[in-house]
Amino acid sequence: MKRMSIITLALGVALVMHLGTNQEVVVIAPPAPILPLPSARQLAWQEMEFTGFIHFGPNTFTDKEWGHGDEPAEVFDPSALDATQWVRVMKDAGIKGVVITAKHHDGFCNWPTKLSAHSVASSPWKAGRGDVLRELSDACHAGGLKFGVYLSPWDRNNPQYGTGESYNEYFRAQLREVLSNYGPIFEVWFDGACGEGANGKRQVYDFPSFHALVRELQPNAVMFSDVGPDIRWVGNEQGWAGETCWSMLTALGHGIGNDNPPSTKSLNEGDEAGESWIPAECDVSIRPGWFYHAHEDDKVKTSAQLFDLWERSVGHNANFHLNFPVDRRGLIHSNDVNAVVGMRALINRTYGEGTDLARGAVTHATNQRGDSALRATTTYSSARLTDGDAATYWATDDDVRVATVEIELDATKPFDRVVLAEPIKLGQRVRAFRISIPAPNGAKTGEWTTLAEGTTVGHKRIVRVAESTATRVRIEILAARACPALSSVAVHKTAK
């Protein structure tokens, strides 16, 4: 006779179904999520990890970073624009999506807008019949990259700028054009710059209405600004996030740009007590400038420098947003190509397939969810840490905040990176951790040598440690906001 019963445990609820006298199926309840939580669009964005940025427009041809809005459209005339080259370079670099400056502060539109004469339609490029957004969006969709747009609210060309609602209405109309005609858009990038227009006036931006329009037209797109609402600026344009980096932020009472933004520290590190899930994006240019300048051809960041920034952004629970200043031909310069392809080679040799020294390794844990009831359960066992499946995870009982896992290693293989990850769909939980290996006489004394200590984990935490060999590596969760959960522990050696 079949019998079903539900029992309440310290960890939550376990469902025990008896199938005869010798067989039972045990389902252990998962950990309760801890607020705030990421949305589906935020989870999809975080999983991309690495995105591209393109700055391209009149500044490319006038050798400026910020145009004044009085540059004639005739200056825009790329001789060999090839958006498929941009996409090919980015795919080779491992980039998953690209955001382009549809309109920068000079007000020039990289699409043939019906709302302004200051656009590609007034340029000699393709006799005024070109559309940069169309070429890039088509290349992205054909090449398997996601497409995003940067649209600057500051417009130094438009005479309505600084007049209040009439300009906000104009900007919403531009947003509608861009968001309605180029297919799915994964990110809308709002710059907080708010300077004077040609009339010497400043504009009060109606960001709530801008955000509402994005939600209406592109519900799967994340929106970037100092305070989100989906992803935040990391507080610098150098491409790195803090050693502590919470995905939460206190946005209430703060604005964008000059409107009382959060402190640089808050943007860089987040806020453990933040009421909103707004993870960080680390933007940086591959060159000193955001737009192309020929005199910077020999100032491109090296592959090693880019690899370092990738580790300090993606590996610090943020996304890496790397800018490419397309040159006057309309191409990504070969120096930039070589640097980013070299960076990808370093990433692949360090973190690519077959490089994880802990994959499939034997694991041990001081607690795993369900221990108090049925030690045989494997749903949340520490073996999930090394199974190579990002969807599975180790978790402890609800009343546990401090726990240890150990991973058995091949003592002949050196390593200098330990990579941790949390299942962030359950919220960000870990507050402090320690990584150790057995001391030289540890087998006899039981002593351990600390390699590193840290705070947050999040989507991915790459921990740099001294080159070591060991029979085991120990991960101690020293403090957590709720019962700890980790989806993976990986061990790597950096490529030379």
Image (spheres, rainbow, N blue to C red):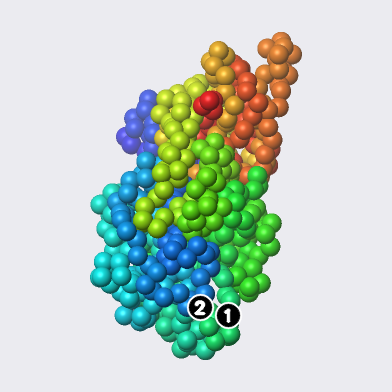
Is residue 360 depicted above or below 273 in this figure? Answer: above
- Which quadrant would the N terminus be assigned to in this image? top left
Residue type highlighted by circle 1 = Glu
Is residue 103 depicted above or below 87 in this figure? Answer: below
Q: Position of residue 426 (x, y in %)?
A: 51, 49
In the image, taking residue 62 as reference, residue 313 lies left or right, namely right
| Residue 11 visible | no
Query: How many tags in the picture?
Result: 2
- The reply to whether callout 2 and callout 1 are in contact (CB within 8 Å) is yes
Q: Secondary structure at mark 1?
A: loop
Residue located 37% across and 52% down the image: 331
Tell me where residue 254 sits by quadrant.
bottom right
Numbered badge on residue 186:
none
Residue located 57% across and 31% down the image: 418
Q: Position of residue 14 (x, y in %)?
A: 47, 41
Q: Nearer the viewer, residue 6 or 157?
A: 157
Q: Secondary structure at mark 2?
A: loop
Q: Which residue is mark 1?
A: 196
Could you tell which of marks 2 and 1 lies nearer the N-terminus? 2
Is residue 128 depicted above or below 246 in this figure? Answer: below
| Residue 297 visible | yes
Q: Which residue is mark 2?
A: 156
Residue located 59% across and 26% down the image: 416
- Mark 2 → mark 1, Cα distance in angstroms: 7 Å
